[in-house]
Amino acid sequence: LRIGTDAEARLSVLYIDGKRLHISEEDAQRLVVAGAEDQRRHLMADD
């Protein structure tokens, strides 16, 4: 289980079983706490 960032969509992404699914930041954090690998990048907000 791996969590990443879709910079274009500005969403967290769950990578599982060869699939890529957009998930909420709350769900991403829950999965990281449960042991998922956190590969998210923090994006700066547009001015």
Image: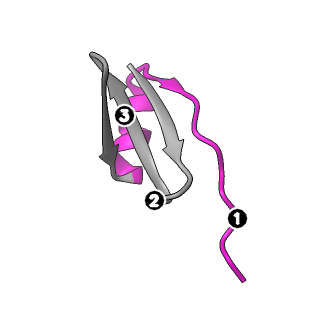
Q: Where residue 46 appears, x then y in whole percent?
A: 67, 77
Instruction: Categorize mark 2 by other alpha carbons within 10 Å: few (<14), some (14-19), many (20+).
Output: few
- In magenta, the rendered stretch is 25-47
> What residue would you read off at disc 1?
44
Tag on residue 14?
3
Q: Residue at x 43, y 19 (%)?
A: 35
Query: Up-down: is 30 above or below 44?
Result: above
The kind of residue tagged 3 is: Leu
Marks 3 and 1: CB-CB under 8 Å?
no
Corner quadrant of residue 16: top left
Closer to the camera in the image, 33 or 22: 22
Determine whether, in the image, residue 33 is placed left or right of residue 19: right
Q: Earlier in the sequence, mark 2 or mark 1?
A: 2
Q: Residue at x 66, y 71 (%)?
A: 45
Q: Earlier in the sequence, mark 2 or mark 3?
A: 2
Corner quadrant of residue 2: top left
Q: Residue at x 65, y 51 (%)?
A: 42
What whole-number distance in Å separates the C-alpha atoms at marks 2 and 3? 13 Å
> What residue would you read off at disc 2?
9
Circle 2 — which element?
Answer: loop
Residue 31 is one of the magenta-drawn residues = yes
Number of marks in the image?
A: 3
Q: Residue at x 43, y 22 (%)?
A: 36
Q: Where residue 17 appears, x then y in whole percent?
A: 27, 16
